[in-house]
Structure formats: structure tokens, C-alpha cells
Amino acid sequence: MFFYLSKKIAIPNNVRLKCVSWNKDQGFIACGGEDGLLKVLKLEAQTDEAKLRGLAAPSNLSMNQNLEGHSGSVQVVTWNEQYQKLTTSDENGLIIVWMLYKGSWYEEMINNRNKSVVRSMSWNADGQKICIVYEDGAVIVGSVDGNEGNRIWGKDLKGIQLCHVAWSSDSKILLFGMANGEIHIYDNQGNFIMKMKLNCLVNATGAISIAGIHWYHGTEGYVEPDCPCLAICFDNGRCQIMRHENDQNPVLIDSGMNVVSIQWNPTGSVLAVAGSQKTIGQEKDVNIVQFYTPFGEHLGTLKVPEKHLSALSWEGGGLKIALAVDSFIYFANIRPDYKWGYCSNTVVYAYTRHDRPEYCVIFWDTKNNEKYVKYVKSLISITTCGDFCILATKAEESHPQEENEMEAFGAMYVLVLCNSIGTPLDPKYIDIVPLFVAMTKTHVVAASKEAFYIWQYRVAKKLTALEINQIIRSRKEGRERLFHVDDAPSGSASGVLDYTKAMQGTRDPICAITASEKTLIVGRESGTLQRYSLPNVCLVQKYSLNCRAHQLSLNCNSSRLAIVDISGVLTFFDLDARGTDSTGQQVIGELLKLERKDVWDMKWAQDNPDLFAMMEKTRMYVFRNLDPENPEHPSKMFMLNFEIRSLRDSRALIEKVGIQDASQFIEDNPHPRLWRLLAEAALQKLDLQTAEQAFVRCKNYQGIKFVKCLGHLQSEAMKQAEVAAYFGRFEEAERMYLEMDRRDLAIGLRLKLGDWFRVLQLLKSGSGDADDSLLEQAHNAVGDYFADRQKWVNAVQYYVQGRNQERLAECYYMLEDFEGLENLANSLPENHKLLPEIANMFVRVGMCEQAVAAFLKCSQPKAAVDTCVHLNQWNKAVELAKTHSMKEIGSLLARYASHLLEKNKTLDAIELYRKANYFYEAAKLMFKIADEEAKKRTKPLRVKKLYVLAALLIEQYHEQVKSAQRGKVKGKSSEATSALAGLLEEEVLSTTSRFTDNAWRGAEAYHFFILAQRQLYEGNSDAALKTALRLRDYEDVVSAVEIYSLLAVCACASRAFGTCSKAFVKLESLDALSSEQKQQYEDLAMEIFTKHTPKDSRKSELDTFLEGEDGKLPTCVATGGPITEYQFWMCGVCKHCVMAQEITKYSFCPLCHSSVG
């Protein structure tokens, strides 16, 4: 960062200034001083013609207004940028709010408490509230609303002298600075929270006071996430920068000066600390401004003349600073250290945005005017060379380390090698802070203050066959090395990657580095320069300077070194000059006589060791052999190419005098660029002999070959067209080709340029037939253009015409046009190479049917089955497996089912088997669930439903076996024979299974159990008794206790006390009951049968029949009674019967709930 004073404004009558404040949005500058002085100034805006991009150039005043209203010394001025208001206060406690009306400032509101003086005022981040603190401890918080301002709350802090106030960025916290140096934290309602811990005052002695509190509100983003933003500074020079008000580990600074004012720049990246410093040998103090980063790193010092500096304020763009000194306002220009570089026609630059925590890095291709954006966390620097750039960043906490990348340390920083569009090519993790980075075409050098790391990088396109074979060599062979600055490497196999070297300190830290192809220069704070050879890294020479380097730069042949020191003085050092010192000893290296001040950057020419450009304040100078040419003023463009004087003179000679005279001038002042200029001028006039000689002199082989080719052409017009194309005048060349009726040459020209849009136009505009293959190629190239920019709809139109099915499939997929993708798959011939890829696209979006069709079309049934399994379409998977005779589907199904059962997903396993038509396995699992639910004595209806589902699965299994047998029986065998064969096989398969023998038994048991209770509650006790008697056959399904308990209740209700007595006898004999339960049953029986004789009151023929015939008549599942009529209804699913007169009441089977119809 570079600073210099640029302008000085004197206040009339030598009135001393007390305060200054710069409006960040509108650019107004308010300054207050003694005798009620209050002025509002404004620097006139520069025109586009004069504006220097990235530079704050001096300008004149466009406003200079005195504001009348204060009588005492104006001590506080503060802006509300959002509402364009100025708030001022004087030593008498008078507060005035000023507003802008028709270009002038007028009083809007006046307030005077008449008790004390205002010490500080602060608007919050959104300009809605102002907090005013008085010296006597009074605090007032007001709103911006209303003509007279609205007071929100006020508070008197008894026994406290206030001097400073600051809002937090979210307006929830207020900091109050006390006269005794304490800082108290309050909430936004005036409630005390705590005292702030002031780490910076440890070991401080004597009386101290607060010089300034400034809390950056983050409106323009932060340098990095969790960046310190709250600066507190004391008059003794001690300062602490905190991340928040409770930060226990703040950044501590001792500026070593008497501080009067501090302020953050508008982006929160630089803290300016203004005050004075005692200088040895001088009586009076020197006014200085120190600049620091949020992390406490010192950026530089600006010395300011006059006696007493009282205040400072930043301009809204952060490129200027205003300083109130005695009765003057000084303006200083700030030149920040921008993160930027230039490689392969591309400008790479970085900036922060308020809506993102990362740096936004732009790769701007100036040739094609295309931009590539990349977001990088914790960016440290950008370094460029040739076609590549290095982004130095902090490593993320979880970074993909290479195996054995760090043996002893976890890398904390990373150097990312990128190409000119921002694609990362090779990251290198290192464990030293890359404070200084230099780059050549083969090496990257990164240095901390103690050590430097050298990486010999490689990129794939430049590897030879030999290098490809050797690329797996370990770093022990020297591709990465580390050296301590105090070491003296000899160039042998030293410099192994040992990061313990970086931990060792040094008394003379590194302050700058630079490198060329053969030389590395390391500058140290003492002024020592160390010269190393590259690539073997051997310490060649040490030089001594009388300054501390801030920037070093080597010329193209490494003979001269440019040094910009921390004061902005540019000097030059001849590395190879030999001379003698005052003692007569021979020394190597000589400081050249040229010295320039206020320099903030310089650049050597890449092809001339004596030519360089430098930036001095706001002007650029070009030097040849240390002699300056005329200063150049950049124009409004972002990037400019400046021609040096000899190039301009040569161009003028060619235009005005002629080629021969110009040739003589260039002979006297030879340079490859001048010979190229002559060659180009000769080509324009078709002077091929002169052009060839000039191309030979500038060693341009392509130019020589071009001239030879021109010599073989007969037509002058053709020569002119070729020359126009050579000079990039393609429109003119194309027009000339078309005028010669050579459309083929015009198309060839556009093909070389890659301008496929124009190729298409030319192919379609011609009268003759266009080359079909070339037309297809053009359509596909235009499609690629749109696809690269993700304009898939446009790309589809051209790929269809170019019949590029592969890219068409990709576009349909990106557009999610799966109908178009399906039509494309259907249009492809069988076994086309694109079909598997299209099928996989369908798989990724879960479209099973289309994926299967594509796989089958390319003869990949195994992949089709795998797709069905992956997408849980087991039914389809089994069908495909059977169709294509694949045997592994059963084992796959069983494996998946066991996986589900392990996770207790039994119902999912049943559904899986059911979908795959494995009904028997599904039924077994369902019976298991039903049995478990029955044991838990859950709701009987739920248990019945589970048994019905299991039985239905068994019925489906029966049907499946019969269908399979029908398929096996060939010839004219009857249906009865087929069914018999099915039954025989089924019987063989399931002889041991209770499920297939009587699948409906469980459902019947719980059906009658529920039916009996329903009949009983409906008052039909006789029917309930008959149904309950049925339950005696189902003791293996329903608990005997429940059966006979229900039977006893039904019999008692039906006054069949004989049956009731038998039920009690059965209950009292059950082993499942405890002795206490049996005693309860006996007591209940005694109570009943002492009142009623244990005989049935009526014994019907039906009861006798049931007991005698053992229930062989079919049972009606609707009533629970036997069916004695000849005609009855039988369910087609469960094969159970219902009496004819009863079935008319039902739409569904009472047992299995299948449709009666």
C-alpha cells in the first residue's frame, strides 16, 4: 500500500480545526473548528476523460459553504448518509441537524440541553437511530423520524464521565467509552451488560484516555470470515482490534505514538491511526498516520506537516483520506495493494462482496471479452507468469492431502496453479505463510519471513515423452524444496522438504523476493540481498543496500534489479558490475545513480533489458537506459498499450517519407518490434523483398514463410486478400474472396477462425450445393458453442440438423426433456453404442420402463434386470429374468428380503415377495406376523385382516402353480388332467406346510370370534351361542381361555346353563390359568349355579345334530350356523358358504371381503 499527500486546503483566518468527517455516499466533507466554524466542502467529480481508473487524483472544490449557527468551538460532526443529514455539536452543548435543500445546507432541528457538553454522537448502521453521549453521563437515543426528531429513550449514568459511543453492526449493542479509559457494554435499551476486557492495556502505566472507538459494520463485506472489525485505541498508542464485543483473544497493536483519532476505511480492510510521534534529535513532535490491516500487520506510515493533527476521515471509495491539521485540511491519496495479475491476454483480479464470505476472483479474457468467475476462501495473493497464475490461500480444515504429503505437519496454506480461465491444474499444500510469492515459467517461489519454498511446476501440454516417464518421481528428487533464509545452499541435493526449518526464527526476516529463469533474489529487512541460482538453488552472492525493500523486480536478462523501498523510493542495482570499495577491496554489484520518489509500481520490458515503465503518483513514465521519455497519461480504458518513442517515430517515417528511409532509421536503431513494423508496412504495399528481409531481421519464421507463399500467387487481388487476413482484417479479406467468386476460400478463412456462425451463413448463401459433411460439422460446432454456454434449447436445434445424436442426448437430459430422449432412443438402430448411455440417463432419473427398453434394444438384459432391482421394480425384474432365462433373480430376491428382515422391515419384505410373484414366501411371512399379533392379544379385527391377507396370498400361490402346470401340459390333454397335475405338484411342494393345507383356518377363527361377540351385543344370544360353539374347533388359533369365557357368557345369556356349566368345567381345568384365576372361576360358577340349575332350558334338534354329527354340514360365515338348505352361495375366492337368504344383505364376502358379484 502506498500513500502520498496530494492537496491542501487552508481555512480562512487561520481558524484551528477540531474535527472532520467525509460523507461516504455523497462525497461532502464537513469540518468544524474554533469560533463556531463549520464548513461543508465537496471535491468536484472528475470527468470520464480525466478519471484515472483505480487512482484518486487531485481535483478542485465544487462546494464551499459556511454553516452559521454555532457560537462555540465545534467539536463533533457526524453524517447520516442514508438520510443525507449532518449532525453537529459545539462546546456549549448545542446540537444542530442540517439538511440539504436545492444544493445548500440548512438548519432542520436545534437542541440544547444547557447542562453539559456533547462528547460523541453516532448513527447506527441503517441510519434509523442516533446515540448522543454527554460529558456528565447523560445518554439520549433518538430516531431519525419526524421534523423535530423522536426521543426513544434517555438515561443518566451517575458518577460517570462519557467521551465515546459506538453501535454494533446489528444495532443490538452500544459501547460507551469513559473518561477514565473504561469501556462499558450496554444493550440497545440502555441496560448494562458488562465491562469490556482491555487486553491492550496490560502493563500500561500512567493516566490514559480513549482516542477512538470505531466498529466497522460490514456493509462492503469482510476481508475474510470472522474478521476483526471493532477497533479501540488509546492516547498512549495501545490498540486492540476485536471480532466482537466479547472477544477474549483480540489483535493487539502498540503504535508507539500519541493517538488522536482512528477510522476504518469503507471496506474494513485498513485501519488508519492518526497522531504524533517524538523523533530523536527534533524538538517538536512529527504528525503521522499509521495504517494497519485488521490482523495488526503494519502497512505503512504517512508523515504530515504542520503542528497539531486533530482528526481524520476516509473518502467513500477508500482511495483518499482527509486530515484536519491546524487550520488546514490535507488530502492524501491511497494506492491499495490490489490482488491482480496478467497472463495469456487475461487480467486476473479479486475483490470482496458484502453478500459472500469468499473473494470473488475474475478471469477476464481481454481478447474475447469473456469473464470467468471463481470464488476463493481466504485468498492471500495472486501471482502470474506466462500462461498461468498462482492463487495463494489458506488451506481449508479438511483438504484432500496427497498421500504422505505432510510427514510431520498438517499443511495450513495452499498454492493453486491455474490456467487463464481459472481451472485449477495442480494444488500444492505447504506449511509456511506465503507472504511473498514470485513465479517464472518453470518455478514458483513462496516465502515466509524465515524460509522460502521452491516448486518446479509442470503442466501437461509441455511434458515431453521422457518427462511423462519420470513424472512419478518423488519430491526427494528436487521438484519441491525448502530453505531457511540463514542457510547457504551449495546447489547439491539440499533443500529437502523439512518444515522444521520454517519453525526456526531469524534476526533478519525476509521482506521481498523476485525471480527470473536463472536467478532468485531474496531481500531482507536489514537491506541485505541474497542472490541464488536457479534451478539448482545455490547461494551465489550477497549484496548490501541502505534501504528496506518493499518490492523487487529483475529485468529480462537478470543483470539489473529494481528496488522500491517502504518509502516509495525507486533505485536500481547492477548485479554484475565490479568495483572497489573505500578500503580498496573488490566488490560485486553497484547502485546506479537514478532515483525516483513517490513510486508505487514498476515493470521491466520482456524483450529489452534497458526498458521499463514506472508509476509515480498519478503519472506513468517510460525509461530507456535510465533516461525518461515523456510521461504518459492513461485514458478512460481499463487497459492501454503505449508505444515508445522509437516505435512512434518509425511509424511516422513509414507513413510520411517511405519504406526505404524508414528502413535506414531502423537499421540505426535496431529492435525486433521495429523490424516487424517495417515488415508489416512492406506487406501492405506488397513489397515482398523488403518484407522478407525485415522478417529475417526480427527472426519471424512464420512471416518469412508467409512472404514465400505470397510469391507463388499470381493474382494481385488474391495477394491483397491474403495480406488483409494476415493483419486480422477478416471482413475485408472475406469480401475480397467473395468478389473473386472464391466462396471456398472465404469459408476456409472462417474455418481457421472458428467462426462457425459465418461458415453456416456462407454455406447456405451459395448457389451451388454445399458440402453436406461440412454443413453437419458447422451445425455441430454452433451446437457446441451454445452447449458450452448451457443454452441447451438453442443447442438442440443445431444438433438435430447436424445429426449429432450423442450431444443431442446430453442436451435432452440437461433440459429434462425425457420424451425427446425416449424418441431419440426409439429412432436409434439396435445395438447402437449410444443406447447404454441413454439407458443410464433414464436410470439416474428413475424412469425404469424407458431404461429397460433401451437396455433390451442394445442386447443387455442383465443391465435391464439390474435396473429394475435398483429401482425396486421386482415384478418387472422377475418377468425379465424368466423371459431371458436368468437364474440368479431368486437368490437376489432372497438376499434383499433377508436384508429387509434384518432391519425389521417385514411388511416391506412381504411387499417385495408379492410384487415379484413369490406368493408362498410372502404368505409365510404374513402368517408369522398374524401369529405374533395374536399372541400380543391386539385388536381381533386387525388379527383377522392379517390372516385374510395371508390366506389370499396362499390362494394366489395355488393359482400360480396351476397356471404353471397348464403351461407344461402339451398336446390335447384335458383341462382336468392339467389341473390334476398342478394339484399333485402343489401337494408335493407343500406336504409339510400347515399354510397351504388350511390357509383360511386363522381367518375363520377370528371371524367367528368377532361374529359371536357382535351377535351377543346385538341381543341375538342364540345365534351368538351357536357361533361360540364353532370356536371350540379353533383352540390352536384363539386362546382357550377366551373361547370358553365367550362360550360361557353366550350360554348364560341364552339361558343354556348346561352348556355354560361345561364351559366353566373346561376353564377350571385349563393349565394356562393360575390357581388364583381358577378359584375366581369356581366362585363365579358357584354364584351362578346356586341360582340356576346347570341344565339347558331348551335343547333344539340343531344342537343335538351338531353334537352328534360333529359339524359336518357347511357353516354359514354370515350367521355362524350350519346350512341345511340345498341352495347356498359360495365365495369364489375363499370357497366359504353363506345361506341364500343371508347373502342378499351383503355386497362383499363376510370372511375375505371379495366382491359378491
Image: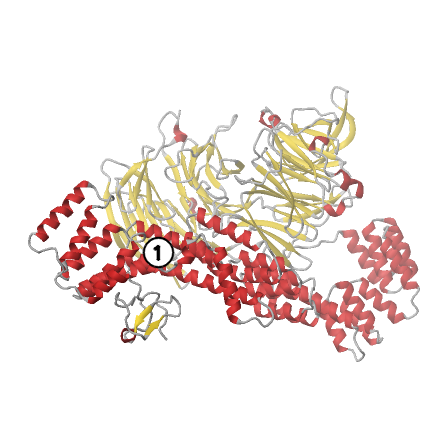
Residue bearing mark 1: 98
Q: Is residue 325 above or below residue 855?
A: above
| Residue 695 seen in the figure | yes
At label 1, the amino acid type is Trp
Q: Is residue 79 above or below residue 4?
A: below
Q: Which percent across, then down, holds residue 896?
A: 50, 51
Relative side of 748 to 80, left or right:
right
Position of the N terminus by quadrant: top right
Classify residue 138 by image quadrant.
Answer: top left
Image mark count: 1
Q: Nearer the viewer, residue 1004 or 126?
A: 1004
Q: Which residue: 17% across, 59% down? A: 1051
Q: Which percent across, then down, holds residue 751?
A: 77, 65
Q: Secondary structure at mark 1?
A: strand
Furthest toward the bottom, the residue is 767
Q: Nearer the viewer, residue 1150 or 790?
A: 1150
Furthest toward the front, the residue is 1108
Q: Which percent across, then down, holds residue 427?
A: 63, 42
Furthest toward the top, the residue is 583
| Residue 106 seen in the figure | no
Furthest toward the left, the residue is 1091
